[in-house]
Image (cartoon, rainbow, N blue to C red):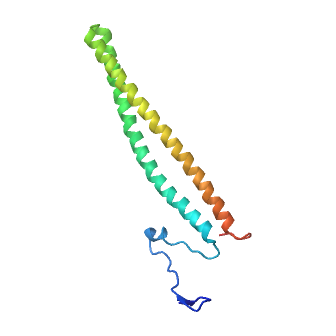
Amino acid sequence: MSVREDGRTREPETPPAGPADLKKFRPTTGVTTPSLRSANRVHERLLRLQEQLKRVRATERVLAEQVAHLDEVAADAETRKLVSQTPLADREWREARTDRDRHRALLDDARRESDELLAERDRLLEQLQELDTTRRPEGSDQ
């Protein structure tokens, strides 16, 4: 225990015991409260953004598989259309092509969202790095 200037005692900070505790433990020695709060907000936003990115990438993988399958379905339907030359085969080909195009658009949207999340992550990491360099005294190599 240590004694504060006002005479009250405080418990010493205990180091983290495991990875889950790392998120909670942030030493505050030499750090101003506003910059620490800002760093905490950026860190929390980064964690939420990483979870979002995982979900978008999973969606992207599923859509890529679906587009590959629908490409094959559309190619088969086109072959049937050309061989049989019936209105039904033509309609099936158009439907298969429409489904494939719809899924390609969804895949493009997922990729665009993934790119936006990556750009946001990079921006937040730069912001966190700036906060870290402003918190540290010059000549400190921690």
Q: In which image quadrant can residue 32 be found?
A: bottom right
At horizontal 39% and vertical 28% (from top left) the residue drawn is 102
Relative vertical location of residue 59 with respect to residue 17 in this rendering, above or below: above
Q: Residue furthest front?
A: 6
At horizontal 37% and vertical 39% (from top left) the residue drawn is 62
Q: Residue furthest top?
A: 85
Relative vertical location of residue 122 with respect to residue 69 in this rendering, above or below: below
Counting from the top left corner in percent of width and height, residue 86 is at 26, 8
Q: In which image quadrant can residue 70 be found?
A: top left
Relative vertical location of residue 93 with respect to residue 107 in this rendering, above or below: above
Counting from the top left corner in percent of width and height, residue 33 is at 60, 71
At horizontal 48% and vertical 75% (from top left) the residue drawn is 16
Residue 129 relative to residue 114: left or right? right
Q: Is residue 80 visible?
A: no
Counting from the top left corner in percent of width and height, residue 68 is at 38, 30
Q: Nearer the viewer, residue 123 or 80?
A: 123
Count the numbered circles shown: 0
At horizontal 45% and vertical 71% (from top left) the residue drawn is 21
Q: Is residue 70 visible?
A: yes
Residue 33 relative to residue 60: left or right? right
Relative vertical location of residue 51 with respect to residue 113 in this rendering, above or below: below
Quadrant of the image containing the C terminus: bottom right
Q: Residue furthest right?
A: 139
Counting from the top left corner in percent of width and height, residue 118 is at 53, 46
